[in-house]
Amino acid sequence: LGSRPLLSPPEFASAGAGAMPKYAALASILLGSLVAAVGAADGLVKSDNIKFHDGLSREDKWKSIGHKGITLWMTGLSGSGKSTISVALEHALVTKQPRPYFVYRLDGDNLRFGINRDLGFSPEDRKENVRRVAEVSRLFAEAGAIVIAGLISPYAADRAYAREVHANASLPFLEVFVDAPLATVESRDPKGLYKKARQGMIKGFTGIDAPYDIPEAPEVHVRTDLNSVTQSVNIIMQHLDQAGIHLPRRFRQLDENEAPTCTAP
């Protein structure tokens, strides 16, 4: 991103979270707009007496931030490293660059405490989960955020929907396949879920008795069994550099009325 590589995991682990105070208010406003993003699952708007209200243009929002919005869709099995890499990437972009970037991280587990708290893990609920996160990601990307959306999203059709939501809005979208063999993620098992699934205590667990459609052509493919967290983050930032989200900046020219006048000594 003209981006400086992430240096080491301890750096982002201890980094402060207050590097972007001016973006906090914008994130709050966006979160207040989520009702519009989680409408009918069938794609139909069920309200009749409504009107879409335009405001500040996307281009003006992006100019004020200095870069375009984009969504990084982090998909992979439980335990593959999605959340760990997402947090590290967030720190790398916010606290490790010459100037902070506007970043918002949408974690699949975190969202199930709020906007997706009414959803379980049935195929229908998984589909709705992806739909909501895709729409929320679009809102943030529209505002100029680098959105890091991390969720298993096991079905290729649902991930294609997320991509289509962004394509229809002419917004950049990168599918990031956070990949590790099943044996590796089972050995990690940070939540103890694979063990429970093998014991039959959890039904419909992705990778065990529920399918995961491997991405066929992701923009970014990160093997977390072969790369460290730091290496994985740097790989993703290299692709962000190539995505062309930076805007050329120019000096604002002075107006005659605000330019100082020369006076004789």
Image (cartoon, rainbow, N blue to C red):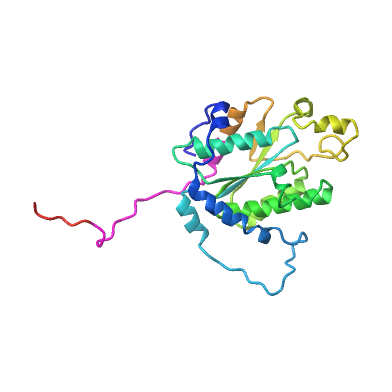
**Residue 76: x, y in percent?**
72, 37
Residue 117 sits inside the magenta stretch:
no
Label the magenta part by its dominant secondary structure: loop
| Number of marks in the rendered image | 0
Q: Residue furthest bottom?
A: 49
Name the foreground residue: 59 vs 34: 34
Could you tell whether 112 is left or right of 238 in the image?
right
Name the foreground residue: 68 vs 105: 105
Residue 241 sits inside the magenta stretch:
yes
Name the foreground residue: 118 vs 242: 118
Q: Residue at x 37, y 50 (%)?
A: 250
Q: Residue furthest left?
A: 265
Q: Residue at x 57, y 52 (%)?
A: 27
Q: Is residue 68 visible?
A: no
Could you tell whether 254 is left or right of 144 in the image?
left
Q: Is residue 27 above or below residue 3?
A: below
**Residue 50: x, y in percent?**
66, 72
Q: Is residue 33 visible?
A: yes
**Residue 155: x, y in percent?**
78, 45
Q: Is residue 189 above or below residue 164?
A: above
State the extent of the magenta-drawn residues as a range.
236-259
Q: Residue at x 51, y 31 (%)?
A: 5
Name the foreground residue: 252 vs 196: 196
**Residue 48: x, y in percent?**
71, 73
